[in-house]
Image (cartoon, rainbow, N blue to C red):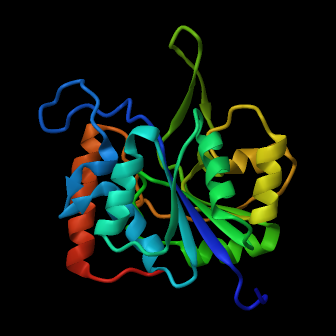
Amino acid sequence: MSASSPDVGAIVVAAGSSTRMGDPSTGSGQATDKLFVSMAGRPLLAHVLAPVQECPLIHRIVLVVSSDNLQRGRDLVAQHGLDKVSAVCQGGPRRQDSVRLGLEALGLCDWVLVHDGARLLIEPVISEGLAAARETGAAVPAVPIADTVKMASPDGAIASTVDRSRLWAAQTPQVFRYDLLMRAHREVTADVTDDAAMAEALGLPVKLYPGSPLNIKVTKPEDLRLAEALLREAARSGGRRH
C-alpha cells in the first residue's frame, strides 16, 4: 500500500467470560453473556462492530470470540451485514493471547487497531488514533481521571492521595504499526491488561490521544442500562464521526 493509502486492519477482542456480569433482567449472580444482550434493537457486540465496519479507513476486521461463541459470532456477522469481517476466530486463555491469535488471522498490514468487544464507540476516534500513531508507531485513547485517587494500604486504610494531574484512564481502540505489535507479542510474556503495556515493556514510546467519556466498557449489569441510554441518544442525534 502507498503511504497515502495504508492497509489498516482491526481486531475486536470479545473472548472474555463475562464473569462480572450477572443476569440484568433478574438481578441474579448467574453470569450472562453481555456481548449478545439486546439493546436499542441489536446485540451489544453488533453495536460495537458497526462503527468499525462503517469506517472507510479500515479495510478488514477480525473478530475474536470464545470457543463457545464461535458460531454465534459468525451468525451475528452474517445477520448484520458486517462484510469487512474477514475471520471469526477463537481466543486464548488471556486477553493478550486472544490479540495474538487475532493478529495471525488478520495477516500482514500496515496498521492495526485493537478494540475491546464490550466497549462502545459512541464517538469513534479511529482517524485520531491513526494520526497519533504515525508519530511514534503506537497510540492509545485516554480520558483524564476526574475523581480523587487514593492509594490503599494492605489493611484497607488510605496510604496516600495520588496526584491525578498526570493520570489518564486508557481506552480502546489502541493503534499500532503491525510489525511493532507483532514484535511485542513475541517478546513480552508477562501478563498485561492492554497492548500498550506490551509496547511500554519494550521501551517503545506510546502516544496518548483524546478518548471519549461516552465510550464506556460494559462490565457490570448497571453498565448495560447506561449503554442502552447512550445508544438511544446517539441514534436520536444521528450520525457518527470516524
Please tell me how many numbered marks the rendered image carries.
0
Horizontal relation, residue 84 to residue 162: left or right: left
Counting from the top left corner in percent of width and height, residue 199 is at 78, 50
Counting from the top left corner in percent of width and height, residue 78 is at 34, 67
Q: Is 135 rendered above or below residue 138?
A: below
* Residue reaching furthest to the right: 203
Q: Nearer the viewer, residue 32 or 155?
A: 32
Question: If the image is split into quadrants, where does the N terminus sit?
Answer: bottom right
Determine if residue 163 is in view: no
Q: Is 169 rendered above or below residue 134?
A: above
Quadrant position of residue 163: top right
Q: Is 30 rendered above or below residue 219?
A: above
* Residue in the image at 73% along x and 91% along y: 4
Quadrant position of residue 69: top left
* Residue in the image at 74% along x and 68% along y: 108
* Residue reaching furthest to the top: 155
Determine if residue 142 is in view: yes
* Residue in the image at 42% along x and 48% along y: 70
Quadrant position of residue 171: bottom right
* Residue reaching furthest to the front: 71
Counting from the top left corner in percent of width and height, residue 63 is at 50, 57
Counting from the top left corner in percent of width and height, residue 167 is at 62, 47
Horizontal relation, residue 10 to residue 74: left or right: right
